[in-house]
Image (cartoon, helix red, strand yellow):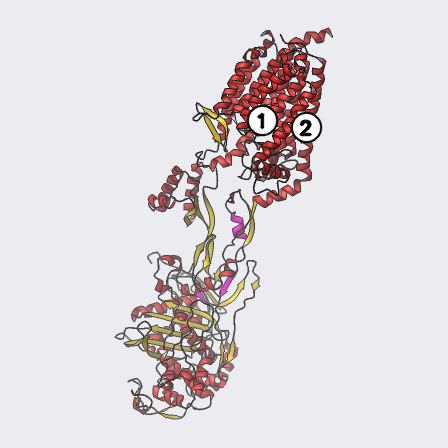
Amino acid sequence: MSVALRRPAPPSATALFVMTLALVSLGLVMVYSTSGYIDAGSSRLGHDAFFHLRRQVRWVLLGLGLLFVMARMDYERLKKFALPILGLSLLLLFLCYVPGIGHKANGQWRWIRLFGFTFQPSEFAKLAMVIFMAKTLSELREDEIRSFMGGFLPATLITGVFLMAIVMEEDLGATFVLSVIVWLMWFVAGMRIPHLLSLVCAAIPAFLFFILSSPWRLERILAFLNPEKYRLTHGMQLDQSLIAIGSGGIFGRGLGEGLQKYYFLVEGHTDFIFSNIAEELGLIGCTIILLLFMAIVVVGLSTAHRMPDTFGSLLACGLALMIGIPAMVNLAVVSGCMPTTGLPLPLISYGGSQILINMMAIGILMNIVYHRCKTVDPRRKRA
Amino acid sequence: MSRPLERTHHRRLTIVVALLLLCFLGLMLRLVYLTVALHPHYRDRADLQHRNATEVMPRRGEIFDREGRAMAVSVLCESLYVNCSAAPRDVREEVARACEEIFGQPAEGYLRRLQGDQRIPLVRRMEANQANRLRAVIQGLDLGSIDIVYLAPETRRLYPMETVGASVIGFTRPDHTGDNEGVAGIEFLLNDLLRGRAASGEALQNAALQPMEPLGLEILTVTAGHQVHLTIDSVIQRVAEDALAETVEHFEADWGTAVVIDIPTGDVLAMASCPTFDLNQRASEPEESKRNCAIMNAIEPGSIMKVFTFAAAMEEGLIDEEEIIDCMGGIWYHPARSRPIRDDRSHRFHLLPLHEAFAFSSNIATVQVADRLTTEQLCETYRAFGLGQRTDIGLPGERTGTLRRPSEWWGTDRISIPIGQAISVTALQTAAAMAAIGNGGVWQQPNLIQRVEDAAGNEVALDLPRERRSVVSSLTARRMAALLEEAVEIGTGTEAQIEGYRVGGKTGTATRYDEDLGQYMENSYVATFTGLAPINDPRIACAVFVSNPNRRIGHYGGEVAAPVFREIMEASLHILGISADPLTVAGEAPPEVVIEAAARLEAPTSSDTPQINLPPAESDHLMPNLMGLTMREVTQRLTTRDLLLRFQGSGRVVSQTPVAGTSLRGVSRVMLVFEESEGG
């Protein structure tokens, strides 16, 4: 297997790497652009304008290392680790509630703090879930997947436990993203359409209950429908985001020339970094980012399409969705197409967990691409 | 090993790809809609919150004297601001250390002021070199934000003439734009005009409404306030202040004041107070020195009141200058008063022509003249002359003085008031009343503001009251002028004589009434003098008050105030280029004839020296060497010449135009530059 690695990397793997690097680099620039002013004015951060940039650079370097490790490690070996990884991920999710380790930010227990690093287990859960689902689904026969008891029920039960754990952290965005990724993997794996639709039908009342269970969620939904009306309360963030995007226009204000970052758009370097990019780089910058994400998704899914083995195919599919779905949801949120949920833009937003996990995902995807080239080429020659 | 791929799998993958691409396309369309279609809307909303229409105060306008010499200017300088909440401790310490090094104050004081969490001006309006040193320090701090420690431009008010006209010009106190809020004098009166209109500029701000950048220098320089041209002539003002200061010092007086008025226009040429203060050191000068004595001190004027008593009687046709009046040997036991009315020991007469009784300031004669008038007639005339009435010149703190209504005149008032007791007036009122006599009996509201120009130089209309009223006939005015001239020629005011000019004036010496104690002070006097010149065509009126001169040195108006008047008047006549009278001899000729004669002689020789009949000595036609002389010495040296003197600066002459030795034929203007000598 390792023979493949000594050959020159196939073009699509190189393309994946270059696109990832482009997104991550743009992310670094924009993290500085959006956080520099606030950091310099913050006595809590010691007026260090480079506070966030420095940390992000650290994460990116670590992420690059993980990316190369994953790219060189045979993805088949992940099968063996699938269950332990899943267990670890579940453990981490529950560690959020353990005093001393769990870390609260913005009123939500979403983080754990170990050895001075803050980590968001829900990001890790995504990767664990994708690997686990790819393994489980690839080991089931087709009729098992199509059966209720054999495929549907175990899959939904395990996923349900994860979703419950994340929902308890009030992380609606991550819950939504994870369920969409898993749901699409089931769909690709061949689960019956009525089963899948029944899940959607079940999700709707659950979603409604969830919204109505706390007044501020309802307010958020109302604010999403009319951000300008609620611009001083729950709609403020979205309204400021739309101002950023809209005022950027086609060409943007120019790199570093954005004004929304001067306290107008809070979380401008994390969940709403895309709005600041749109303000500074305009529609042109947005289009480039959108195309890059699209390209990553297309490369991933086309790899899945061509993989001879089901595990590799489902894994590639899941990994591509792991990048693509959060990106889409994030863009939909900041452009006002979806109610606001806290979700970082993969590879770009500030945040160690998402950088590490997503770069790992890219690394695994690259590894699958190597294998596809190795295994598919002879078949192509034959055809 | 995992199972092989199914066809369903491929089909469904294709569906997922299509679905995702569709979603991306939808997002793309949404972004296009936001950035293209909604761009104008969001651009406006962004501008609304990013741009703060800040009001930028313009640079304060200058104050000039009537010759365009700057008396108050605003210069741009910089102030150090610190946003204490954003500045970390080490930055604050560094700033305090730098300030200690640059400004010489202990660092602890600066640190204490930096304890709070506000944005404070730590050092305001520093010198340019200090600002540059501080700028280097700030750049070395590496703060990452311009909003924490920064230098912001502010204006600083400077008064190039220091003490000259200090109490008239007034001063400013700092507001958020620098020294820009007038609190006294003209600075207060015309504050709104000097400030100018606030220019609205746009500054970027963050969501905490803090400006993103300090206000630009350009904005401050472009929109300046209005410029005010005063009627004050700074040279006359300086001469008046110097003369007063010398007299107040010599006679150990409490205070002195002098007002000079241009008779034809009512312009105030000088309004001097002593003590005075240096406007540039206003914070450290004592408060008493900031009083404008010319309008804030109302005193009993004493004998100068007789001028107006006589004018009232003259106007009613009740007296004749040539009539003989009984001065009763200087003591008159008047039935209305327990104490006798006395004349001064040195001027006790029995029978005297009325004009001489006036010249020698006889109280007894004046009371007899006043007795021919009703209380209403007296009071009405005084009121018409503006005595005990506010002039409404506009300066803050003007006193009204006291002139009671006829119904409130009690007991001995009909004796006291006509000779200047039980009435109080300011120096400005007195000078304006004297100007009315010089102006053919027409009283004009005194005026301090010549014109106001906006920053572009267009004159701005001011709504200032300019009242004119006829008080007495022009004949009465001329007859009074003749009486006044005699008082200077032979009477109590001989100290006021000016060589080459015909001067009229009246002395006054009144017992000082202490307002704080509410009683007349034994052996404490106010010496006054008011007069005008030249008599044939009065141009300048002047009033001088000196309060509480030391009696052992002298206390009479004639010996204390008259010399001051002479100095001021002499300088004023020269500075304004008023020709010396062709006829300096008066007395015998009736005033009308004098005026006609003067007019006839004046016409062909207006630009020459008075001694036209004599072949002038050669030296008289050469410019003398004036280097190193003071302003007063210069005016004395050029006394006899009909030259218009232009002075610049203060101190001693360092430059003269024309140079010494050049012929003065055809030269009408002399330009002199003064500078303070090093040794002080």
Q: Is residue B485 above or below residue B58?
A: below
Chain of the residue on which disc 1 is drawn? A
- Name the one closer to the observer, A63 or B568: A63
Residue that mark 1 sits on = A175
- Name the one closer to the observer, B357 or B392: B392
Residue at figure coordinates x 53%, y 66% from the top left: B451
Q: Secondary structure at mark 2?
A: helix
Whether residue B556 sits left or right of residue A118 in the image: it is: left
Whether residue B364 sits left or right of residue A11 in the image: it is: left
Which residue range is magenta in the image? Answer: B208-234
* Image quadrant assignment for residue B463: bottom right
Residue at figure coordinates x 48%, y 33% from the top left: A49
Q: Is residue B41 above or below residue A327?
A: below
**Amino acid type, mark 2:** Cys
Q: Is residue A39 above or below residue B443?
A: above
Residue at figure coordinates x 42%, y 79% from the top left: B502
Q: Position of residue B620 (x, y in %)?
A: 42, 71
Residue that mark 2 sits on = B23
Disc 1 versus disc 2: nearer the observer: 1
Q: Position of residue B389 (x, y in %)?
A: 44, 76
Q: Position of residue A226 (x, y in %)?
A: 63, 40
Between the C-alphas of marks 1 and 2, the distance is 19 Å
**Amino acid type, mark 1:** Thr
Q: Is residue A62 visible?
A: yes
